């Protein structure tokens, strides 16, 4: 599905290096994903992390699961790796002497939670223990360096994994900048975040890696330049014309930002 994007060419064209795998809290070989749609499991409520709730797998994408908390709405889905410590088999919570909680924004009256829980688990297909994978250990320190390329979850669109660059490093944190998006989706995270992956991750998991954005402004000055733009920029311009999506992206960003100088993607 990556017809328009190839890391090898891109690294060469941008003269950049990829972050080595030992930088990441990810397994060297991505874990196999043996979950099936409809399976239920326990998950920490992302909006209330001290609560453990029942979740249903409503989608599978590479080594990740699209999850929805039972009793919640369809506007708060979240994605977790099969080796995330945020998910566990049903029964784990009770074994620890804890109680399963209704999700934040439970659709019904709180008093109906115990009955809801019984009904949602009755006859449910529970994800078997064997398909949960152990979370890999943290790298001992932050090995990332500014300029290294990687694949990262777009936190505003968490179903998307996109080409990114380390923009800054500060203690245990890294600044994730998305190539071709002029800062609109950038964020700081811990170096051991489960949302960042080495180059090639999506190819291995079969997940769709998004192409870089096309948001390099084509100002008059560059269009008037007699010499043709660098290869990477030309390619972005081409993909902007071919792909149906980038036109919409460009418009969205264009609304909030005025054109700036041309920068490499
Ligand atoms: N629908 C969004 C997708 C942007 C994805 C950017 N990822 C870094 C848009 O077109 O704005």
Image (cartoon, rainbow, N blue to C red):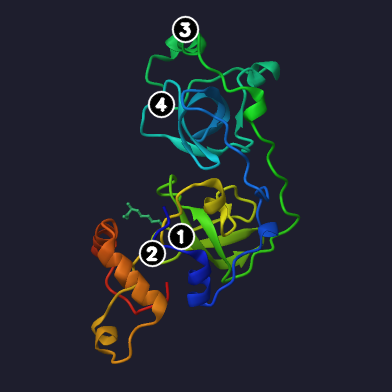
Under circle 2, the secondary element is loop
Asked if the residues shown at circle 4 and circle 2 are in contact, with their CB atoms under 8 angstroms apart, the answer is no
- Nearer mark to the viewer, of 4 and 2: 2
Asked if the residues shown at circle 3 and circle 4 are in contact, with their CB atoms under 8 angstroms apart, the answer is no
Ligand 1 resides in the quarter of the picture at: bottom left
Indicate which disc, 3 or 1, sits on the residue closer to the N terminus. Answer: 3
Q: Residue at x 76, y 55 (%)?
A: 140
Q: Is mark 2 within 8 Å of ligand 1?
A: yes
Residue 117's spot in the image, x, y percent?
Answer: 49, 12
Q: Nearer the viewer, residue 256 or 1?
A: 1
Q: In the rendering, which numbered label is found on residue 181?
A: 2
Residue 102's spot in the image, x, y percent?
Answer: 49, 20
* The C terminus - image quarter: bottom left
The residue at which mark 4 appears reads as: 105
Work out which residue is located at the far bottom of the displayed protein and give it.
226
Q: CA distance from mark 3 to mark 1?
A: 43 Å
Under circle 4, the secondary element is loop
Under circle 3, the secondary element is helix
The residue at which mark 1 appears reads as: 186
Tell me which corner region of the image, top left, top right, bottom left or bottom right, holds residue 169.
Answer: bottom right
Asked if the residues shown at circle 1 and circle 2 are in contact, with their CB atoms under 8 angstroms apart, the answer is yes
Q: Nearer the viewer, residue 218 or 258?
A: 218
Indicate which disc, 3 or 2, sits on the residue closer to the N terminus. Answer: 3
Q: In the rendering, which numbered label is found on residue 115?
A: 3
Indicate which disc, 3 or 4, sits on the residue closer to the N terminus. Answer: 4
Q: CA distance from mark 1 to mark 2?
A: 9 Å
Q: Residue at x 64, y 36 (%)?
A: 85
Q: CA distance from mark 3 to mark 4?
A: 17 Å
């Amino acid at each position: 599905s990556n017809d328009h994007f190839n890391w090898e060419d891109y690294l060469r064209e941008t003269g950049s290096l990829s972050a080595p795998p030992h930088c990441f809290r990810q397994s060297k070989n991505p874990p196999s994903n043996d979950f099936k749609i409809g399976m239920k499991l326990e998950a920490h409520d992302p909006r209330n992390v001290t609560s453990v709730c029942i979740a249903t797998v409503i989608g599978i994408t590479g080594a990740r699961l699209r999850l929805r908390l039972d009793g919640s709405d369809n506007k708060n889905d979240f994605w977790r790796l099969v080796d995330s410590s945020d998910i566990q088999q049903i029964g784990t919570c009770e074994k620890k002497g804890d109680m399963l909680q209704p999700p934040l924004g439970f659709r019904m009256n709180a008093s109906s939670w115990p009955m809801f829980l019984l009904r949602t688990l009755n006859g449910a297909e529970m994800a078997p223990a064997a398909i949960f994978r152990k979370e890999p250990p943290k790298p001992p320190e932050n090995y990332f360096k500014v300029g290294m390329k990687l694949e990262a979850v777009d936190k505003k669109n968490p179903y998307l994994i996109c080409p990114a660059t380390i923009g800054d490093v500060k203690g245990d944190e890294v600044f994730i900048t998305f190539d071709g998006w002029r800062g609109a989706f950038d964020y700081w995270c811990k170096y051991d975040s489960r949302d960042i992956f080495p180059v090639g991750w999506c190819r291995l998991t079969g997940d769709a890696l998004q192409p870089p954005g096309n948001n390099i402004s084509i100002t008059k000055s560059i269009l008037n330049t007699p010499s043709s733009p660098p290869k990477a920029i030309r390619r972005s311009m081409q993909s902007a014309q071919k792909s149906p999506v980038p036109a919409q992206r460009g418009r969205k960003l264009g609304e909030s930002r005025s054109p700036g100088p041309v920068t490499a993607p």
